[in-house]
Image (cartoon, rainbow, N blue to C red):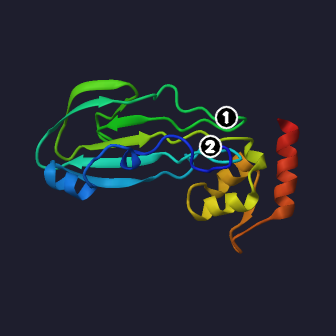
Amino acid sequence: AYGTDGWGGYSAPHASLKIPSFELMEVMYPFFYLQNEYAKDTAAPGRWRGCPAHWMQRVATTDPIYNYIQVQASERPLLGFAGGGPAAGNYIVLDYHGKNEQMIREKIEGYEQKPGEVMFAQSGGGGGWGNPLDRDPDAVLRDVLDEYVSIEKAATDYGVVIDMDVLKVDQAATEKLRRSMRAAA
């Protein structure tokens, strides 16, 4: 992981499992995917940032779906190393934004997902490596442009000030902010 961004937990679509495509899953099973993407501000900060968490939402369509859900390592997400931040952690939300919304961090057996009900899952990503204040400011800018990191987190996690009007790092403001963050630590 030293010297490499994106270390840590792989999201389900990038796992070593041989699973069908999402389109084929929708043909085979009574659900439809509403979201399947990396989540902004979930890549653990570090000199080399962790892998972002993955967000997935699916809705049951015509038939109830019976689920056995086991959330792995949710209470102990992948830690950061050498001063890097911890991963975002895994969890599932049943009946997402519904009247019976319930967060699952361990397991549930035989859960019946009814038609129209949405299930949300976060695959927790990876931990950061090294002090985030040592990350190359231009790498933070790339992370902002690639939507891994927000402007706010660029400043609060990495001490990098970005002028979005010109899409550049404000070097003087970054040096000042990083000095004050190091002094406060």
Q: Are marks 1 and 2 in contact (CB under 8 Å)?
A: yes
Residue 81: which numbered mark, if any?
1
Give residue 119's quadrant in the image. Answer: top left
- At x 16%, y 48%, the residue is 29
- From this view, report whether residue 10 is shown above or below residue 36: above
Q: Which residue is mark 2?
A: 1
Of the 4 image quadrants, the one containing the C terminus is: top right
Q: Does residue 39 appear to the left or right of 84 in the view shown? A: left
Percent x, y of residue 15: 39, 44
User: Which of the two residues, 63 or 71, is positioned nearer the viewer here?
Assistant: 71
- At x 53%, y 38%, the residue is 88
Percent x, y of residue 144: 62, 60
> Marks 1 and 2, Cα distance to the nearest angstrom?
9 Å
- At x 53%, y 52%, the residue is 40
User: Which of the two residues, 134 or 2, is positioned nearer the viewer here?
Assistant: 2
Disc 1, SS: loop
Residue 109 seen: yes
Percent x, y of residue 27: 15, 55
- At x 65%, y 44%, the residue is 45
- Taking the view exactly as shown, the residue that stands out farthest to the left is 63
User: Which of the two residues, 10 or 76, is positioned nearer the viewer here?
Assistant: 10
Disc 2, SS: loop
The residue type indicated by label 1 comes to: Phe
- From this view, report whether residue 19 is shown above or below residue 76: below
Percent x, y of residue 101: 32, 35
> Could you classify mark 2 by the number of other residues whose Cα lies within 10 Å: few (under 14), some (14-19), or many (20 or more)?
some
Q: Does residue 29 appear to the left or right of 109 in the view shown? A: left
The residue type indicated by label 2 comes to: Ala
Of the 4 image quadrants, the one containing the N terminus is: top right
Q: Does residue 1 appear to the left or right of 180 in the view shown? A: left
Marked residue nearer the N-terminal end (1 or 2): 2
Residue 97 seen: no
